[in-house]
Image (tube, rainbow, N blue to C red):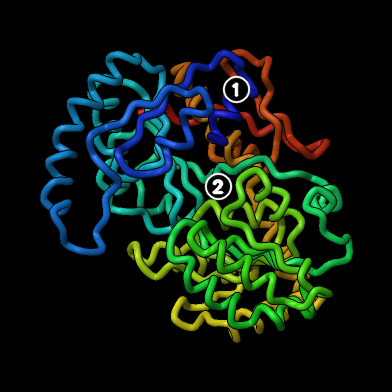
């Protein structure tokens, strides 16, 4: 959706259609946006345990190849953009067969099996982490992770959230999977946390009632310092910009939004799914932007110790600066530029040009087929140099 926003900011009448599977957020998130949704017979792949799906899912995948081909013939797209995953396999292969150019984005440091299987069918690849290009086919571009728009004014974000300007704010959320460990850690140390900090806690819908009960059990003088939510959508952008420290998982979007906001993060990687999150987290930890805690070691005491980072101004400032250095606020625009190049059948931009867009340079909207990159820093060199032809 961030890439759709970037496309429409440059060409208002871009037509977008979405292809998803029969499990995931698409069915609830996409229709309200007005984008038409086609759903393949297959589901997102799960490999945690053996079940009837172990037999049925390959059959669904096989049937989805002809379905994806029919969708592309009917839609006649100028280009395909995919974030990888199981659903992407039949769509990318159908696009290659029909000579529809495609851009595959990979969000993990270590590509998943679906991406490794389908990457050769893509016309170009973009990645969240630069090292990932070493194991994927060319042309491959380091764009970062496309994210929602973040507000520029931290003070205004705090006002919208009803938070004091001087408060030390801790944002805790466990992502879409396995939030129980986070919720248990908060519950066991909540009284001590709110003595020192304000806490925004995304508890998930099933645990939200218990979080509210814990809030009501706090002394009245500190009760307003704890703000639980079942989830955060539009408010998450304000929460990220307002936070002094984030404690969360190591999904690509989480890390990208934290670095775009320049906020330090204590990362507790989700231990399953091929340990992709651990690899993502190490990238930030090695750069000095994050502190890493293993899932099995994360409890209330670990949470309280991690929060004390906000009481060390020098270390906090170093981590915030390192986080901001890694940020790629223009990732959506960089992916949009690659898509426009594919649609117009022109040569792809250079890696250096895409790098500058990803870091916030502005793309000219009146340069015709040879769109230039306008440097965001006055006097910077114009990096718009044609690159290799798309496959």
Q: Which mark is residue 144?
A: 2
Rendered residue at 33%/64% (across/down): 274
Q: Position of residue 40 (x, y in %)?
A: 27, 32
Q: Quadrant of residue 342?
A: top left
| Cα gap from disc 1 to disc 2, whole angstroms | 20 Å
Q: Quadrant of residue 279?
A: bottom left
Q: Which mark is residue 167?
A: none
Mark 1 is surrounded, within 10 Å at the Cα level, by few (under 14), some (14 to 19) or many (20 or more) other residues, namely some
Q: Is residue 160 above or below residue 299?
A: above
Q: Is residue 102 above or below residue 243?
A: above
Side of 332 relative to 133 (left or right): right
Q: Do callouts 1 and 2 mark residues in contact (Cβ within 8 Å)?
A: no
The residue where tag 1 is placed is 8
Q: Nearer the viewer, mark 1 or mark 2?
A: 1
Rendered residue at 84%/67% (across/down): 167
Q: Position of residue 26 (x, y in %)?
A: 42, 37
Tell me the element at label 1. Answer: helix
Q: Position of residue 62 (x, y in %)?
A: 14, 36
């Amino acid at each position: 959706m961030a890439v759709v926003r970037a496309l429409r900011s440059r060409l208002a009448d871009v037509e977008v259609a979405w292809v998803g599977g029969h499990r995931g957020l698409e069915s609830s998130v996409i229709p309200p946006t007005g984008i038409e949704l086609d759903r393949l017979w297959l589901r997102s792949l799960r490999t945690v345990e053996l079940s009837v799906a172990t037999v049925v899912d390959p059959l669904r995948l096989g049937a989805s190849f002809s379905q994806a081909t029919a969708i592309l013939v009917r839609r006649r797209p100028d280009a395909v953009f995919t974030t990888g995953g199981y659903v992407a396999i039949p769509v990318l292969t159908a696009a290659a067969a029909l000579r529809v150019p495609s851009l595959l984005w990979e969000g993990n440091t270590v590509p998943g099996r679906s991406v490794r299987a389908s990457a050769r069918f893509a016309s170009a690849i973009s990645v969240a982490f630069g090292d990932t290009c070493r194991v994927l086919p060319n042309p491959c571009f380091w764009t970062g992770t496309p994210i929602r728009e973040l507000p520029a004014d931290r003070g205004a974000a705090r006002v919208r959230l009803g938070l004091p300007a001087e408060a030390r704010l801790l944002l805790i959320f466990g992502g879409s999977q396995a939030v129980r460990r986070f919720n248990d850690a908060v519950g066991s140390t909540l009284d001590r946390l709110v003595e020192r900090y304000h806490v925004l806690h995304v508890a998930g819908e099933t645990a939200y009632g218990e979080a509210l009960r814990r809030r009501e059990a706090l002394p009245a003088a500190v009760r307003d310092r704890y703000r639980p939510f079942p989830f955060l959508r539009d408010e998450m952008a304000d929460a990220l910009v307002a936070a002094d420290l984030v404690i969360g998982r190591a999904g690509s979007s989480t890390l990208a939004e934290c670095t775009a906001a320049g906020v330090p993060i204590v990362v507790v990687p989700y231990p399953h799914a091929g340990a992709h999150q651990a690899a993502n987290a190490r990238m930030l930890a090695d750069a000095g932007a994050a502190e890493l805690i293993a899932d099995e070691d994360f409890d209330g005491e670990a949470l309280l110790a991690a929060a004390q980072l906000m009481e060390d101004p020098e270390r906090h400032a170093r981590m915030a600066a390192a986080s901001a250095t890694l940020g790629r606020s223009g990732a959506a625009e960089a992916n949009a530029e690659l898509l426009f190049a594919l649609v117009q059948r022109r040569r792809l931009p250079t890696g250096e040009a895409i790098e500058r867009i990803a870091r916030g340079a502005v793309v000219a909207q009146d340069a015709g087929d040879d769109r230039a990159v306008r440097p965001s820093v006055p006097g910077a060199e114009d990096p718009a140099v044609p690159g290799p032809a798309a496959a």
